[in-house]
Image (spheres, rainbow, N blue to C red):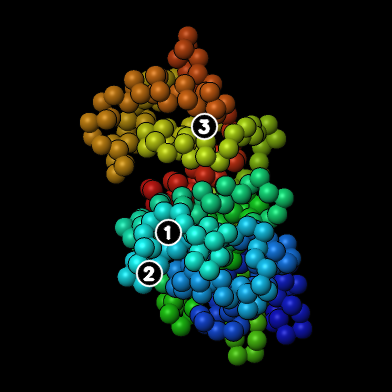
């Protein structure tokens, strides 16, 4: 449908992830961005802006032009531009926007891989899970990453971020300038969103999962990876995470423990013999770039004395030392993060 007779927000309905296809630096693009950010928590939501093509002060200026002088309830800007486009003193780390000290400013290191990129964004999203507001995530603009990563890398990043946002109740939109984005990549990106909002000569064209009757199909009907089915509904006996997002990052931060969780996640409620689990983990980490070869010889001891106790303390597994078996307790919240990590780490 076109947006000539309806506002953008009316056209996209309850879509939680939106691909915004419009020329960068255009009035249409910035106006649509502002409307998407404020659609659920007007006028001042919690906002995370990942900027890939404009400086933080430019982002703030765009907000003030289209929304007003009053700032969002909480705001953070993640500067992911190439280092040579940033000013002096713009290294990695948290600081403040010069014209608005209340806005948190983070930078992603120049040599960051996509896993670092996703973790930085995920950490900021997770830091705000205590709010009553729905966090709004803006990523502007994906085509600027074409020269830094492969098309498949970008697809994996988008899948991971959209899954994370959906599971954590975050509304997200990603910008793409069609003039600078290869058509083949744009075709790969479209099916990954709940809605695609595109600027044409006739105005806005909006396609949603509910209205899509022809290709491309949308994210709910697309397998996340070859050979894998779409995410099933949360099981009724799922164990909730009783701890903070920082604890989740700690659980997945160690490469051996992360690999252990990759294996356990697919075997909920199975009593897995410890020796079998050690063999599987040893085989998996032997090809993982983040694990050194000399560490694999001690993985069995690491599991028993470090990783299994830590996971049991967090209520993720049950380990019986008498029978030497491990049972994983299914948890969709943790699995959302594992999906993100595995997709970016292992492809």
The answer to whether marks 1 and 2 mark residues whose Cβ atoms lie closer than 8 Å is yes
- Which mark, by number, is residue 16? none
Location of residue 153 with respect to 132 vertically, above or below: below
**Foreground tag (1 vs 3):** 1
- Name the residue tied to disc 2: 86
The answer to whether marks 1 and 3 mark residues whose Cβ atoms lie closer than 8 Å is no
Report the residue at 32% width, 36% height from top. 285
Residue 113 image point, x, y percent: 36, 55
Q: Nearer the viewer, residue 50 or 66?
A: 66
Report the residue at 74% width, 65% height from top. 42
- Mark 1 or mark 2, earlier in chain: 2
- Name the residue tied to disc 3: 267
Report the residue at 47% width, 9% height from top. 322
Location of residue 218 with respect to 328 vertically, above or below: below
Instruction: Inspect this view and state whether residue 230 appears.
Output: no
How many numbered marks does the figure carry?
3
Label 2: element kind: loop
Question: Crowding near pointer 3: few (<14 within 10 Å), some, many (20+)?
Answer: some
- Which image quadrant is residue 268 in? top right
Image quarter where the N terminus lies is: bottom right
Residue 235 image point, x, y percent: 66, 37
Question: Crowding near pointer 2: few (<14 within 10 Å), some, many (20+)?
Answer: some
Instruction: Inspect this view and state whether residue 112 appears.
Output: yes
Left or right: 224 as drawn, with respect to 168: left
- Which mark, by number, is residue 107? 1
């Amino acid at each position: 449908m076109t947006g000539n007779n309806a506002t953008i927000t009316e056209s996209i309905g309850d879509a939680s992830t939106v691909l915004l296809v419009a020329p960068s630096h255009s009035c249409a693009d910035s106006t649509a961005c502002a409307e998407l950010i404020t659609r659920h928590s007007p006028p001042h939501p919690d906002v995370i802006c990942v900027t890939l093509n404009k400086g933080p002060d430019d982002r703030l200026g765009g907000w003030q032009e289209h929304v007003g002088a009053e700032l969002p309830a909480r705001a953070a800007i993640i500067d992911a531009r190439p280092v040579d486009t940033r000013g002096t003193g713009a290294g990695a780390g948290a600081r403040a926007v010069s014209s608005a000290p209340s806005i948190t400013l983070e930078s992603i290191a120049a040599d960051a891989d996509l896993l670092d990129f996703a973790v930085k964004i995920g950490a900021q999203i997770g830091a705000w899970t205590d709010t009553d507001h729905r966090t709004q995530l803006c990523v502007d603009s994906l085509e600027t990453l074409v020269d830094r990563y492969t098309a498949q890398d970008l697809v994996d990043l988008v899948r991971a971020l959209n899954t994370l946002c959906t599971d954590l109740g975050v509304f997200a939109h990603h910008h793409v300038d069609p003039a600078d984005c290869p058509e083949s990549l744009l075709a790969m990106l479209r099916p990954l969103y709940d809605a695609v909002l595109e600027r044409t000569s006739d105005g806005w064209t909006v396609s949603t999962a509910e209205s899509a009757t022809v290709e491309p199909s949308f994210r709910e009907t697309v397998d996340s990876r070859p050979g894998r089915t779409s995410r099933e509904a949360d099981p009724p006996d799922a164990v909730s995470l009783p701890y903070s997002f920082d604890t989740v990052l700690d659980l997945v931060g160690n490469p051996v423990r992360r690999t252990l969780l990759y294996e356990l996640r697919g075997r909920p409620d199975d009593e897995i013999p410890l020796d079998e689990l050690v063999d599987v983990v040893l085989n998996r980490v032997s090809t993982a770039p983040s694990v050194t070869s000399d560490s694999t010889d001690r993985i069995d001891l690491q599991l028993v004395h470090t990783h299994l106790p830590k996971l049991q303390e967090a209520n993720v597994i049950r380990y019986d030392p008498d029978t030497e078996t491990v049972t994983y307790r299914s948890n969709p919240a943790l699995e959302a993060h594992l999906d993100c990590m595995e997709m970016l780490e292992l492809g």
